Image (cartoon, coloured by chain):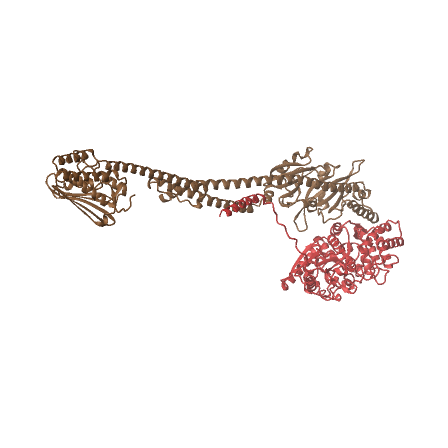
Amino acid sequence: MKNWKKILLPLAASALMLSACSGGGGNTETAASGGSGDAAKKEITIWAWDPNFNIAALNLAKEKYAKDHPDVTINIVENAQADIVQKLNTGLNSGTTKGLPNVVLIEDYRAQNFLQAYPDAFRDMSDKIKAEDFADYKAGPTSFDGKQYGIPFDSGVTGFYIRTDYLEQAGYTLKDVTNIDWDQFIEIGKKIKAATGKDMLTQDPNDLGTLRVMLQSAGSWYLKEDGVTPNIAGNAAFKEALELYKSMFDADIVKLNSDWSQFVAAFNSGDVASVPTGNWITPSVKAEASQSGKWAVVPIPRLKDTPNSVNASNSGGSSWYVMNVDGQDTAADFMADTFGSDAELYQELLSKIGVLGTLKAAAGGEAYEQPDEFFGGQKIYSDFAKWTTEVPKVNFGLHTYAIEDILSAEVQNYLNGSKDVDAVMNDTQAQAEAQLK
Amino acid sequence: MKAYWRRFHAQRLFVKLFLVMVVSTVTVSIVTSLVTIRMSERLFTETFGITNSKVLNQIRTGLESFNDSVVNAATYAAQNGTIKTYLSGGESNSVRMANTYFGMNQQMRRAKSNVDAYGVGLTAVGVNGRNYSTDRNYWPVPADRLVGHPLSQRIEKEPRRLIYQYDMERGEDGRPVPYIIASKALMERTTGYIYGNLYISMREDEFRRFYGNFTNAGNDVVIMDSTGRIVSSNQTKWIGTVSKTLLSYTESASKGEEVVRRNGEVFGRSSIILSSYIPEYDFYLVNLIDRNYAAGKIVNFRDLVLVGGLIVGAALLLVFIITRRQTRSLTVLVRQMSTVTQKDFDNYIRVTESSGYEVQELSRAYNYMLDELNDYIARLLQTQKERRNAELAALQRQINPHFLYNTLASIKILVQKGDKEAAGETINALISLLQNTISNVSETITIEHELENMRNYIFINHARYGDRIRVNVFAAPDCMQYRVPKLIIQPFIENAFFHAFNEKQSGMIYILVSQADGKLICEVSDNGDGMDSTQEWTGTDMGTSLPNPKSKRQLFSGIGVQNVHNRITLLYGDDYGVTIESRKGEGTKVKITLPLIMEDV
């Protein structure tokens, strides 16, 4: 009894002291453990840009897929294209796939750059989709080493958007601009400018998109078939395209712009008579409702002196890529089920968002046959679908944008007359070879 | 109710003690906790203040280096001819224009390379209506809206300064997105001709990165312009609001002091406000530390209350048990002590182990005192008893001189009458009587001897007064060896001789000695005059009923009947004594009850 008391009292006292000391202790969180390497993980993440176009398309696909697969969680994350490119480069460069998404949208011009540098980072989709189900020209950028990596998405098929009212004022009909070549284009442009005072087209000197459209119409590109060797010096198609490009400026039918909004503003304000570019411009053209009925879309002009040039080309466009991270099988299944095969989905994408897909099976549907009053009742999607099949297939290779950076500066030298066309081509070739070694 | 009150009353010492202990324990623990909390709070906020001052300086450094980059970009743009041409030149042919546009893009990219480390957009607007943006989506303000925009108005007022301003634009999804815009007029230095404005825009969430790492819950950073508008904060809901209160706390920040520390009430929270003025931006960098949150972070009230409560509870339980035990034994002690008056010093206190040292000692002392007291009283009683006994014994032992004188006178008459034989026998009887009463030193004598004395006494009386009163002695033989005090029967015989036969001239006196119920019974009865029944003597009112033996008679000894009774009770207790039965005209019977004693004590 006595001993018990002797022990208890100091105990109580020490407990009091302890209570005075305690209180500062925080919780230590245990770090979450890493991934388990689960290919069938039911939660996937997708990165894309442009909420009005790509993200909207993803949401439609997700909605459809969720009906049959309620157990799969799909997180759609919007990032700017530049951010995605940078994050992918950073992630893949560091050799870890941590923090990378299951599916990523990559522009076709850049695709090979990633596929060839990091083929193991992407899932081979050959078992899920067939390249021949999609527009032929999409196979080049989306596959590598005989394996189909990308799920081709939107079409960059080009059209020659033209103001029919200006055309009439210059004394032309729509027939006069259908299936023409670029020389005719420039002539008509001159006439229109003389008649209306409006420039024929608008260009950003830093973006040589028109040059690329010309090249692809002839099945040629900045790089050779191998995708790495610069294909500029001695490239006849290139030379013709470059000369045409200069002719446009020399003819003084070009209104300059410095970015996308000025580009759109140029035709929305009625300052230019035509827009020869990818079909993705359709929503922007239609954005100016007051011009309804004054527009038509005809096939893109071709190169006159290059024999295999056709009145169909491509500008831009992108595809989906499944990455080799946890959940790749789920992601592959999702992509194959939706963008990889669902023709019905593409109908919806077209009618609701205006996305022109590249799945051949979807090229027919009802949505494609809808006449568009803005374009005077023309069935533009049907036309685009038709032209899509005609687009020559080229290998965008690894360095499209790298070469364009060199080229755009050289083009200025050519435009202001300080170099002739051969010098420009040779210098560009030399710089590109030096830089891309 | 009354019972309860009494119980409470009995426990009031405990209740008082316990209440005091409860109050003091609880008070001490609460006060200790509060003081500790207060101290740790103060320490925490002090440390926080010092650390955060450093943090503020670090943020400042970051902001200043960003400003340097912005200044570089702006300077590059302002001195660049291509940019000037683009912004102020007129329209020309496509080739020239292509050159200008291309050049503009190149130069702006170069200008932007100064700030490429940060997520910013460059926008330039020229007097000729042209504009350029490195990323129009980044800061989606249409160029035409920039004309006459409040941002531009301020630039016009201060064309030579790089001005940082707050701007709010709607994003693609319609949500308002806050921006911080550094803007500067592009001006020909020599002529002062302003040909355009340069806007370097940074989304607020990018801007937040300068300090985002330093913030956490309860520790907020606010960047505020000189009008009190919050341009950036990790608390997004504050962005764009104007807080003059917060501004007032930072005011003196501009007077030389690097970091100003204030305490105040901001955004409905009691906060420590650290602020630093950044002249490059004309912004105030403010750090708000929520006192309550900070305090709450360091003081876990739930645990504190729990642990404190447990300890207080345990302490009180201990106090309860100890106090209870102490006071209960005390209460018992008090209760027992208070009965001392009722129980003749006999209420000894039980000394128990559990009652505690003090009470044990007290009880022992008290018991010792009672012992002493009882001892003393017993001794006192004993002394008194002995004194009285001695007195009585002395009295009893005295032989009345008159008796001797009368007896001797009777003997002289017998001698003169010549009755030598009777005289000799009388002298023999007196000698034997005197021998037994005077010389025998022991207090008690056997019945045998006592009866022998009685016979001698009777013989002497017969010799003196004749034999009209006859005495018969009947003694049971088994009683002869029991001892009785000397001359215990004599007074009653004497009484019978001299008082029982005043009316009757002759009679008989019987002396009976027997034992019954473990007592020795000596009876002295006569058939004389007797007394009124009312005068019956029971031993309690002694001396009133019996005639005073000393009045006129020559007694053998000075002892009276009452004294005999007193002596017996003194010697042997209340069970023994003398009883007298008497009836008028029939006689008197005296009964002496004594214990059976064999040895001389």
Total residue callouts: 0
Drawn side of residue B346 relative to residue B151, left or right: left
Q: Is residue B541 visible?
A: no
Q: Is residue B299 visible?
A: yes
Q: Colour of chain B?
A: brown
Q: Is residue A246 above or below residue B19?
A: below
- x and y, in percent, of residue A167 in the image: 78, 55
- x and y, in percent, of residue A8 in the image: 52, 46
- x and y, in percent, of residue B55 in the image: 68, 41
Along the viewing direction, whichever of B570 and B192 lies nearer the viewer: B570
Along the viewing direction, whichever of B404 and A174 lies nearer the viewer: B404
Along the viewing direction, whichever of B122 and B63 lies nearer the viewer: B63
Q: Which chain is red?
A: A
Q: Residue at x 53, y 41 (%)?
A: B29
- x and y, in percent, of residue A300 in the image: 79, 59
Q: Quadrant of residue B44?
A: top right
Image quadrant occupied by the N terminus of chain B: top left
Q: Is residue B413 above or below residue B586?
A: above
Q: Is residue B46 above or below residue A218?
A: above
Along the viewing direction, whichever of B33 and A277 lies nearer the viewer: B33
Q: Quadrant of residue B293?
A: top right
Image quadrant occupied by the C terminus of chain B: top left
